């Protein structure tokens, strides 16, 4: 069914974009550097991760139920 393949394509696109946002924000915040990360930065990254998870879950729900 091409309709289902279209939905899966949209879901994959959403998940790839969320992953790219995660990588860009983490690199910008210095999460992958060898230096110690400040507690404020860790708190910020945790909040960003929660937001990205919510976006991915809502995107999945929208793709499969609409």
Image (cartoon, rainbow, N blue to C red):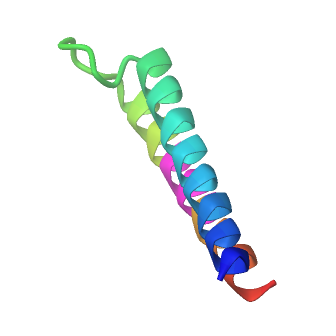
Query: Measured along the vertical axis of the image, is residue 42 above or below residue 34?
Result: below
Q: Residue 47 versus residue 53: which sits nearer the camera? A: 53
In the image as oriented, which residue stretches furthest toward the left? Answer: 34
State the image coordinates of residue 7 (x, y, percent, origin top left).
68, 71
Reply above or below: 53 against 61: above
* Residue 52 shown in magenta: yes
Q: Is residue 48 above or below residue 64?
A: above
- Magenta span: chief secondary structure: helix
Q: Is residue 61 something one can see in this rendering?
A: no
* Residue that lies at the very extreme toward the front in this rendered image: 1
Residue 4 image point, x, y percent: 65, 79
Pick the quarter of the image with the N terminus.
Answer: bottom right
Tell me the magenta residue range.
Answer: 47-55
In this rendering, the answer to whether 53 lies above or below 17 is below
| Residue at the outermost bottom position | 65
On the image, the x and y values in percent for residue 62 come to 75, 76
The residue drawn where x is 45% and y is 47% is 46
User: Is residue 11 one of those drawn in magenta?
Assistant: no
Q: Nearer the viewer, residue 65 or 29?
A: 65
Q: Residue at x 43, y 28 (%)?
A: 26
Residue at image location 36% in from the left, 31% down from the top: 39
- Residue 30 appearing in the image: yes
User: In percent of the image, x 81 and y 83: which residue is there?
Assistant: 66
Q: Position of residue 64 (x, y in %)?
A: 67, 82
Name the one closer to the observer, 4 or 30: 4
- For residue 43, what is the image quadrant? top left
């Amino acid at each position: 069914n091409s309709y289902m393949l279209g939905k899966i394509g949209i879901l994959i696109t959403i998940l790839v974009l969320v992953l790219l946002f995660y990588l860009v924000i983490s690199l910008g915040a210095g999460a992958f550097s060898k230096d110690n990360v400040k507690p404020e930065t860790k708190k910020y990254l945790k909040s960003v991760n929660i937001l990205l998870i919510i976006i991915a879950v809502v995107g999945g729900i929208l793709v499969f139920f609409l």
